[in-house]
Image (cartoon, helix red, strand yellow):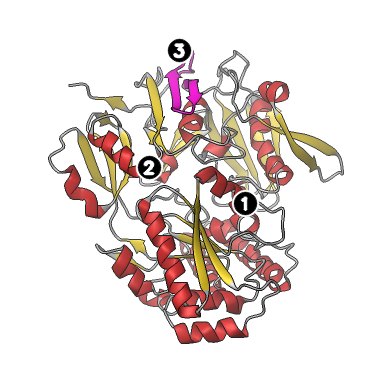
């Protein structure tokens, strides 16, 4: 495999950029979830039960050990889950999907192999959330001995707890099928752990005696051109999304396999609520973007308008293309009128579009955004591109009341998947308790009255849809949420997606679960194997 740069840390409760090749393989999660099959496959847990609307009980797999021999028990699991909110608060935001645990009052170790979650409100998506790598089992002893102090957390009773991260994952931190044997400027390597616990019986994607592949190497390759060359040379088993215009380059290459996948990608443009607090300023941006011009220039093989939740969630998505065009339409005259009428507590005389370097398509998207806004609003614009770790750090930095950018550009809107949860795809990007809070300054405690009031409104709407278990009733609630987001152009907006998506693998990699590879399932299928024929 490959990635563009080193990770900034390995703690699953803090980072998820350039590190998942280590986290997925060296740590144990409760289970995997394959949305295309609606299937949970048990890993660190052997069962779970929703006892009542606010009580969820886990049964831990017996006999599991961390890599140093310490037992994986309920104390370790409750510690691992409970530290997520504490880290989020101590660090004033992390990369984790906070909506997956913000409704939990406590994780209780009920007995040696039982953990009970106590919730303050119902949540229909909790089982799927727990399949994410954030809920990896971490050895508390290793955090005690090797942890880095990150800040303090105040409990409801007023007591203060010091909170520590574990960014190097020293040996003994995890209990997964592999151990980390290399992590340096050239990449990472994980090797099969011989004492890995058995899966008896083995659920889908697992093997009773552990994974078939003995080791995974991930190379650091700074740019896509070099990565493509390595893939074509047979040096990579997993490539990346393939630009449809480049498909002819892979013709006749028997050692590679290009597969078509659902186009579920996200091309997001987040707005700083510290500056764009007046909804008229956000609506001006909405009307200043040339959607049809974007499709013609960036999506030559087909593009579609994108709603706040993914079209991959067909049961929940009730807004069609014509519906979306009510809001997502290019009208420079209206945009200028809205911009002129808007209140700016912090003057915006220039718009900076801020992105990470890497994918050439990402640069094209940001450039198009800057150019169309400059033309429609008659304003100076610029694009700043930095490495992904710097980008991520500045995206969530809250040291100042406003960001050092106006628009955060991220995602290419091509290949991408879904967990099946509306918040994952993609309401988390609008949620005042999640990315809305730490990335976009849209949160309930905002000093901007309009942002604070809007945050309360959308939080209540999000809570209501998350508590609804009837699919049709929830779809109606989700339609209301999306309409509210589009009416207010709240926090973020999705640019038109590609309607086609391709991904590259080596021909020798088998049983990797292609249909769910992009559904936060990649590299977690232990039944993968290499055809050496």
Q: Nearer the viewer, mark 1 or mark 3?
A: 1
- What SS does tag 3 mark? loop
Q: Going 37% across and 18% down the picture, which residue do you hit? A: 214
Q: Which residues are magenta?
A: 178-199
Query: Which of the numbered marks, if any, corresponds to residue 223?
Result: 2
Q: Give the side of residue 532 with respect to residue 314, left or right.
A: left
**Is 347 located above or below residue 264 in the figure?**
below
Distance, label 2 to label 1, CA atoms, is 24 Å
Check disc 1: other Cα within 10 Å, few if <14, some if 14-19, many if 20+. many
Mark 1 or mark 3, earlier in chain: 3
Query: Which of the numbered marks, if any, corresponds to residue 396?
Result: 1
Does the magenta run of residues contain 56? no
Query: Which of the numbered marks, if any, corresponds to residue 51?
Result: none
Q: Give the side of residue 531 with respect to residue 21, left or right.
A: left
Quarter in which the N terminus is drawn: top left
Does the magenta run of residues contain 196? yes
Distance, label 1 to label 3, CA atoms, is 39 Å
Quarter of the rendering containing residue 238: top left
Mark 2 or mark 1, earlier in chain: 2
Q: Nearer the viewer, mark 2 or mark 1?
A: 2
Query: Which of the numbered marks, if any, corresponds to residue 194?
Result: 3
Distance, label 3 to label 2, CA atoms, is 35 Å
- Pointers 1 and 3 in contact (C-beta within 8 Å): no
Residue 479 screen position, x and y as percent: 49, 69
Quarter of the rendering containing residue 361: bottom left
């Amino acid at each position: 495999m490959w990635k563009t740069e080193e990770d900034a840390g390995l703690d699953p409760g803090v980072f998820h950029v350039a590190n998942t090749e280590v986290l997925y393989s060296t740590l144990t999660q409760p289970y995997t979830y394959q949305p295309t099959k609606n299937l949970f496959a048990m890993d660190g847990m052997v069962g779970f039960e929703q006892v009542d609307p606010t009580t969820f009980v886990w049964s831990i797999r017996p006999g599991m050990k961390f890599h140093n021999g310490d037992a994986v028990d309920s104390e370790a699991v409750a510690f691992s889950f409970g530290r997520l909110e504490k880290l989020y608060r101590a660090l004033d935001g992390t990369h984790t999907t906070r909506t997956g645990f913000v409704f939990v009052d406590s994780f209780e170790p009920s007995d040696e192999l039982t953990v009970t979650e106590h919730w303050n409100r119902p949540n229909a998506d909790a089982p799927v959330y727990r399949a994410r790598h954030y809920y990896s089992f971490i050895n508390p002893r290793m955090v005690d001995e090797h942890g880095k102090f990150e800040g303090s957390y105040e409990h409801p009773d007023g007591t203060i707890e010091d909170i520590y991260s574990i960014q190097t994952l020293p040996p003994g931190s995890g209990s997964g099928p592999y151990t980390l044997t290399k992590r340096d400027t050239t990449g990472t390597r994980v090797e099969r752990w011989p004492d890995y616990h058995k899966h008896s019986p083995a659920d889908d994607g697992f093997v009773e005696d552990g994974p078939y592949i003995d080791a995974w190497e991930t190379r650091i390759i700074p740019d896509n051109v070099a990565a493509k060359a390595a893939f074509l040379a047979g040096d990579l088993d997993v490539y990346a999304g393939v630009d449809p215009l480049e498909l002819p380059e892979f013709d006749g290459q028997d050692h590679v396999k290009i597969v078509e996948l659902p186009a579920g990608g996200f091309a997001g443009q987040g707005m700083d609520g510290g500056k764009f607090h007046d909804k008229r300023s956000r609506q001006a941006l909405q009307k200043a973007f040339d959607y049809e011009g974007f499709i013609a220039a960036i999506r030559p093989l087909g593009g579609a308008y994108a709603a706040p939740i993914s079209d991959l969630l067909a049961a929940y998505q009730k807004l069609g293309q014509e519906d979306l065009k009510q809001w997502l339409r290019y009208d420079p005259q209206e945009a200028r009128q809205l911009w002129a009428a808007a209140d700016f507590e912090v003057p915006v005389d220039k718009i900076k579009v801020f992105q990470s370097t890497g994918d050439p398509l990402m640069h094209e998207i940001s450039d198009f955004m800057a150019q169309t806004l400059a033309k429609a609003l008659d304003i100076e614009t610029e694009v700043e591109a930095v490495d992904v770790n710097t980008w991520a750090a500045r995206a969530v930095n809250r040291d100042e009341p406003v960001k050092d950018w106006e628009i955060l550009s991220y995602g290419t809107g091509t290949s991408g998947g879904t967990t099946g949860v509306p918040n994952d795809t993609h309401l988390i990007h609008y949620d005042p308790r999640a990315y809305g809070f730490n990335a976009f300054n849209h949160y309930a405690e905002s000093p901007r009255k309009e942002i604070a009031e809007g945050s309360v409104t959308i939080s209540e709407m999000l809570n209501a849809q998350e508590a609804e278990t009837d699919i049709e009733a929830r779809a109606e609630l989700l339609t209301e949420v999306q309409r509210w987001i589009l009416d207010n152009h709240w926090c973020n907006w999705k640019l038109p997606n590609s309607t086609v998506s391709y991904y590259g693998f080596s021909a020798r990699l088998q049983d990797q679960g292609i249909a769910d590879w992009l559904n936060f399932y990649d590299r977690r299928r232990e039944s993968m194997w290499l055809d050496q024929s």
